[in-house]
Image (cartoon, rainbow, N blue to C red):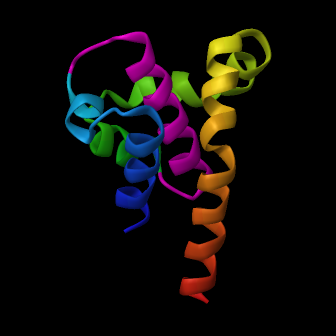
Amino acid sequence: MFVDRLFEIVEKEFGITKEELLSSNRRRELVVCRRIISYYLYDNGFSFYQIADILKRDRTIMYFYIQTFDDELKFNKMFYKCHERVKYKIKALINESKQVSE
C-alpha cells in the first residue's frame, strides 16, 4: 500500500510511469525519482534488499542512492527542485501510514 502510493505521488508529479521507473532506462529524471523513492523507503524501515527488489535494481545501487542523498540535495539543483516538488506529499503519506498502523 505505502509503496504503491509512493509510486503514485511520483507518477503524478513528474509524469513518469511505474513501468518507466522499473525499466533499465537511465535517463536523469528516472534516476532522480528512483533516488527519492529509495530514500523514503529506507527511511520507513525497508532494507536495501527490499528496496532493490521493489525498484528492480542491485542493492549496492540502493546503498549508493541513500548514502549520497544529502549531498545531492546540497549540490545538485535539479535534484533539490525535484525533491521539493514531492517532499510534503510524501511526508503526508508517511504520517497517514503511521496513523493507520496505530
Magenta segment, prevailing SS (helix, strand or loop): helix
Q: Is residue 52 above or below residue 96?
A: above
Q: Number of labelled discs?
A: 0
* Residue placed most toward the observer, 48 or 79: 79
Q: Is residue 80 above or below residue 14?
A: above
Left or right of 21, for residue 83? right
Is residue 87 among what the camera can see? yes
Q: Position of residue 74 (x, y in %)?
A: 79, 17
Asked if the stretch drawn in magenta spans residue 61, the answer is no
Is residue 68 among what the camera can see? no
Q: Is residue 68 above or below residue 37?
A: above
- Quarter of the image containing the C terminus? bottom right
**Residue at the far bottom in the pictured view:** 102
Name the residue located 44 percent from the left edge and 64 percent from the top edge.
2
Q: Position of residue 95 (x, y in %)?
A: 66, 70
Name the residue located 30 percent from the left edge and 45 percent from the top edge.
54
Name the residue located 27 percent from the left edge and 37 percent from the top edge.
17
> Which image quarter: residue 96?
bottom right
Q: Position of residue 71 (x, y in %)?
A: 74, 17
**Residue at the far right in the pictured view:** 74
> Which image quarter: residue 20?
top left
* Residue placed most toward the observer, 16 or 57: 16
Name the residue located 59 percent from the left edge and 53 percent from the top edge.
90
Q: Is residue 47 above or below residue 45?
A: above
> Which image quarter: residue 91?
bottom right
User: What segment is highlighted magenta in the picture?
Assistant: 24-46
Left or right of 30, for residue 89? right
- Quarter of the image containing the N terminus? bottom left
Q: Position of residue 86 (x, y in %)?
A: 60, 42
Asked if the stretch drawn in magenta spans residue 38, the answer is yes
* Residue placed most toward the observer, 3 or 20: 20
